[in-house]
Image: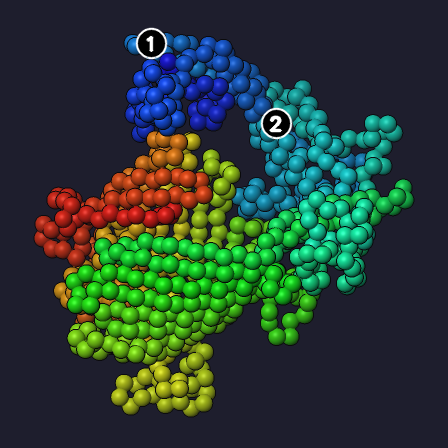
Amino acid sequence: MLDKVKIEVDNKEVTKKELQSSLRQTPNPAFLGFAKTTLNLYSLSGRDSTRWFSRLLRRLGDAPVILDSSLVSRSEHDVTQYLINKGYTEAAVSSSIASKKKKKAIVSYSVTTGEPIRIRTYDRLIPDSTISAITERDMRRTSLNIFQARSNQNRGTLVEPGSLFDQNLLDQERQRITSTLRRNGYYGLNKNDLAYLADTTVAHKTADVTLYLRPQIDTLDFGKYKQYYLGEVFIYSGFDALDNPETNPSLIRDTVRYRNMNIVRGKEGSLRSSILWNNCYLEPGNLFNERRVEQTYSAYGSLRALRSSNIRFAEYEENDSLKLKTIITTVPGRKMGFGIDLEGTNTAGDLGVASILTYRHRNLFKGSEVLALKARGAYEAITNTDISNFWEIGGEASITIPTVVFPFLSASARKRLKASTEFSLNYDYQTRPEYDRTITSVAWKYLWQNRFATADRHTFRLVDVDYVYIPKIDPKFRENLPSNVLLFNYTNQFIVSMGYSFFSTNENPHVKTRNKYALRTSVEVAGSALSGLVHLFGGKPNADDGIYTIFGIPYAQYTKGDVDFGRTLIFGPKASLAFHTFLGIAVPYANSQVIPFERRYYAGGSNGLRGWNVRTLGPGGYQDTNTTTTFYEQSGDIKLDLSVEYRYKILNRIELAGYIDGGNIWTMRDYPSQPDGVFKFNSFYKQIALSYGLGIRFDFDFFLLRFDTGFKAVAPGKSGKDRWAIRNPNFRDNFAWHFAVGYPF
């Protein structure tokens, strides 16, 4: 059995990790470097593979890797070839096999790289004057930001004097230039039309590299490289994937000319001409541009009424024509759908159940408008109360329009902006032991993605109106609330806000070996517009509390912003290390002394400090003394979360995790009801809570189930020896468990 592989390299510029990918045979993976869990599980199956339990263990585990000397020889060759491709032309690799006890083998590879070849000069030899001008202009477009120049394929050059004679890098440069030319009309050009000439005789271990354009083989000229323009554009809408309306005209319902495009409609699921035109970036008369093709694919792919789309080009019959006929075919998707979701909830140990009924229409007005209707009901059994239940009933109606809806905005401007508009109406009725509350919300927002960075998503809430109505409140609960909390959170009020949020990630579900990141940022401003209107029309504050109202109802005024960043480092198919940081700040001002409860931060829970249940930590060093209002008091205006988590897949679908979480919440002001909860620069670090724990995850590809356990390590709400909870780990008051769907970050 192959027990271990060792690699020794005499060059610090070449890492062992990059060479491991060229090995044809590696040992069974080991958890934390020593425990071969999957191999041990397979071994438990025994010799009798006919038993169902043995077959199950073998499917869950990994069979032992049996040493194959022929694969060792092939690994030598592959590592050598990898180094040669990197520019180490004198690389040499040797191997040796040593045996241990119990028929275990160790394979050692000794790698000598030698001195590499480096690029002395890099030039381009392109006789075609137009292509030469494009490539020269592209080469001069070098960014001062080296990272940006290397990451953005339309800026600068990947090949620089002094760099290694790396064949993979040269191939990437060739592909980048090909993409540049195909964005400038060269429809018939591909990567193989470009080649390199390298002169390695000019000096020791250096090469003069020249990129050149291949001539036509038969005529030895460059006549085939022509800049093509787009001719007629035909968009076929409402046809099945197997339909061919070009050869079967009976499938065509009608053909219309809309602006500068031809719209051909079928019998089912066709879209309005304006929507088809608005999402097509291939316009007659423009140069062929491969990027515009990608942009059109992305735009049609975002239309929920479509299942798929296809774009192809055809040259006109005239030999001297430099125009391309564009044919776009869109295939309609399912128009309507129903869904029923059942949820189980666990809020700080209070169990509940919820049900959501959803109806969705994906092409309401023939413009890929999505109408979504939701009805939700929930019940939660609340402990330690006289009335032990919590009911919630609500509904939501929203319509998403795949274009910008705004007064006096032209059609061309809407096409350039490429955003969707969403209008929504939401009603929620809650009855708790302490109070009854209804929240009615109306929102108007825009959603869009960067034109060529589809992983970046933006949301701008032009207006978001929440009306909070409290029809009933328990007298005992009311008496225990501080006056400012009662005034700003448990009376009727308006929350009128606008905000912006941004999300970016490089995660690709099809590429699981790449390091990942996710960034979320948001900012929200509430009450400023209402305050301006009230003062414009000479509004006066209430004589009793100095609060301004609109229609006799107070309105909240605050600013809130937060940043959420996660980074995952992949160490192989089994192991990864994830980091997470969250920082949020909310500031009440003018008409508000306290942030509305719905907008405040809370700590603990399955996605925060997992040593605490949700809403049981903070703010600061606050110790809860009033169980009636604890759920409110343990909220704040500032939040800090820091986490690190090591993940290791012990089986094909089972993953273990160990983690450390830190952070807390604080208030911006010193509220009497939350003593020791205010944020202070000279002491906040002493109030950082810490927890640690283990978790197990079940990965089913389309979703992930997670069980996490957490122990408190440092509890800032405690004093004396109880503060250092790590000294007394127990399942009574220093432990919490969490069940959730998806990773915490």
In the image, is residue 650 above or below residue 448? above
Horizontal relation, residue 303 to residue 43: left or right: right
The amino acid pointed to by label 1 is Lys
Horizontal relation, residue 298 to residue 136: left or right: left
User: Which disc, if any, is residue 167?
Assistant: 2
Residue under the image location 45 percent in, 43 percent down: 702
Q: Which residue is mark 1?
A: 103
Determine whether the residue tagged by mark 1 lies in a helix, strand or loop.
helix
Quadrant holding the N terminus? top left
Horizontal relation, residue 95 to residue 646: left or right: right
Looking at the rendering, which quadrant does residue 132 occupy?
A: top right
Judged by depth in the image, the label closer to the viewer, 1 or 2, is 1
Residue located farthest toward the left when viewing the structure as drawn: 720
Residue 472: percent from left, percent from top: 27, 78
Residue 88 shows in the view: no
In the image, is residue 102 above or below residue 378? above
